[in-house]
Image (cartoon, rainbow, N blue to C red):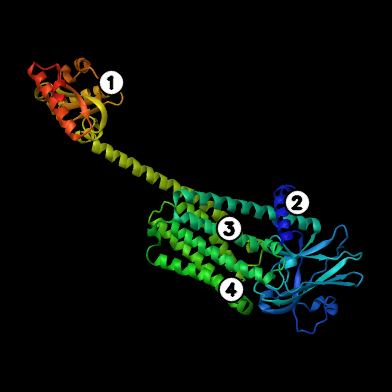
Amino acid sequence: MVGGLIRILLALAGGVAMLCGAPAQAQTGVAGRPLSVCVLPDNGAMDPARLINEPGRFDCTTAQHKLGAGDFWVISHDIGERSRGRMPLNVRFASLWQQRVTLHVLYADGTVARQSTDARGITPLIQLGAIAEMRIPPARARVVRLLWHVEGASNLRGVLVGARLSTAAQSEHANLAMSALYAGFGGLAIALIIYNLALWGALRHRFQLYYCLMVALLLAYTFSSSGALAWAWPDIANNTRLRTNFLLLGMTGTAALVFARSFFEPRVFAGWLGRYATLVSIAMSGVGLFYFCTAPFAIRWVDLAFTCSFVGLSIAVVPMLWRAWRLRSNYLWLFSIAWGAPVLTAAIRALSNLHLIPWSFWIDNSTILAMMVEAVVSSLAVAYRIKLLRDERDDAIEREVMMRRLADTDPLTGLLNRRAFLQQAIGRSGEQQLLIVDLDHFKSVNETLGHDGGDEVLRIFARMLRTSLPAGTLVARIGGEEFAILTPAEQPIEPETVLAKLRQLRMPFDVHVTASIGACRGLLVSEVDWKALYRAADSALFDAKSAGRDRVRSGLRHAA
């Protein structure tokens, strides 16, 4: 097993580097030229030495899957090439449900070479892409044709499909090309899992965990279906590997649907669609487990059930996207892209499983490629949803700040209101200076300018206070035309300066506006202190009004 793991790591490490220099045909992962084959059911008493010289007995027209399960002989058309020691030939074919495969090679000199698999099936022959490869023994004579004896074939897709004749170099390049593909996806999947787990640690959104589960299962399915599992575990039977494929694929489909359900807004899966999605999720995992446990006994039926479950998954996507469009989901466009490839490939695979379209290497591997696209686009969808959640959070914070500001601010002047002023003023340490400012004869200002003009006077005066007073000064409108200014006593404000700046302000229609100020100093540790300080400043203000207005009076002795 250790040797197998080392082999995988070496292949993955060299895959990307070699991919750039590989010939075009190696990029497909199906190296070499195709071989046409014909099939003959085995009656149990056939001599391979005679059969390999009698290709006319084989059926070349009937679709292989129509012959049912059992043991078969498969013969290739004439080859006419040599397998040399320095340039040996290989024959490659798809991995299918089989018990044992024996290859007979007929050479032009009449000799026949034979090699056979053991109880593990084609596990020792597996290459990346789940392609079996058998080496044709080198000889001086040309290879005439090949004859396989396939035992225990389920014949769901065929007895022997995708046969190709390749050189050792072509096979090596194909392995490296496929290793680059799988290594790239593996690195991407691991990075996505780590990244989203890190995000989950910070944000704690459940859909992030479901996404990581989906990608992890897809990574496990890729490891198994790529054939790498056979490299890492050489003793596993190939049929067991195939059963593992279906189990992991069913779990991956379930995880993908659960992720979609947790990602969309809850209203998308309300009602019957939610119940249908739950049913499909259970069916996919259940059929996958059922396939793993019962495939050796009833593979044809469980394979059909598995195909139906994937059709059910594809059907579930259509109403899901329709409901999302109808309810104007924020994530519809991303999921339309992300689920487009899996739905298409699921439909193509179902058609292939039902023999409506022929087998293809890329159809057989389409689930991996489609889910790679789904994983990448879904990661963008996760990032997009996190962005929307962040925007919603920022909007909520902004609204809360605005509501607090509105609750704390006088709507006309933008200064603090009385409640907010007292909340921030009471409890300050050290001696404070309090100024109570009242605009003189403001009733006559309203009568002269009207209430709109009077409001503009208040706004102009408030703007002057905001821009001219030192930073940290509390300024509030505590009454109709009455304002409060509070600052630490060690940084006092000269009240006469405030009056002088007010006299310089240009008011509407050049109306002349003055103010009276009552000043006081004292502590503001408690509400009792505030009442005492305010009474002293208010009394001083009354004295300023009585003395003729447009002046300052101090009430220090009262605060003491």
Alpha carbon of mark 1 to alpha carbon of mark 4: how far? Answer: 83 Å
Q: Name the residue type under label 3.
A: Ala
Estimate how packed mark 4 is, as few (under 14), some (14 to 19) or many (20 or more) residues with alpha carbons within 10 Å. Answer: many
Residue 430, image x and y in percent?
26, 27
Asked if disc 4 and disc 2 are in contact, CB closer than 8 Å, the reply is: no
Please identify the quadrant where the C terminus is shown. Answer: top left
Foreground tag (3 vs 4): 4
Foreground tag (1 vs 4): 1
Estimate how packed mark 2 is, as few (under 14), some (14 to 19) or many (20 or more) residues with alpha carbons within 10 Å. Answer: some
Residue 452 visible to an observer of this rendering: no
Residue 503, image x and y in percent?
19, 15
In the rendered structure, find residue 23 and report the number of the disc placed on it: 2
Q: Which residue is at 22% across, 25% downward? A: 485
> Which residue in the structure is indicated by mark 1?
491
Residue 444, image x and y in percent?
9, 22
Foreground tag (3 vs 1): 1
Looking at the image, residue 389 lies above or below residue 368: above
Q: Quadrant of residue 451?
A: top left
Circle 1 — which element? loop
Q: Nearer the viewer, residue 165 or 419?
A: 419
Alpha carbon of mark 3 to alpha carbon of mark 1: how far? Answer: 71 Å
> Which residue in the structure is indicated by mark 3?
370
Foreground tag (4 vs 2): 4
N-terminal of the pair, mark 1 or mark 4, is 4
N-terminal of the pair, mark 4 or mark 2, is 2
Estimate how packed mark 3 is, as few (under 14), some (14 to 19) or many (20 or more) residues with alpha carbons within 10 Å. Answer: some
> Which residue in the structure is indicated by mark 4?
291
Q: Name the residue type under label 2.
A: Pro
Alpha carbon of mark 3 to alpha carbon of mark 4: how far? Answer: 22 Å
Circle 4 — which element? helix
N-terminal of the pair, mark 3 or mark 1, is 3
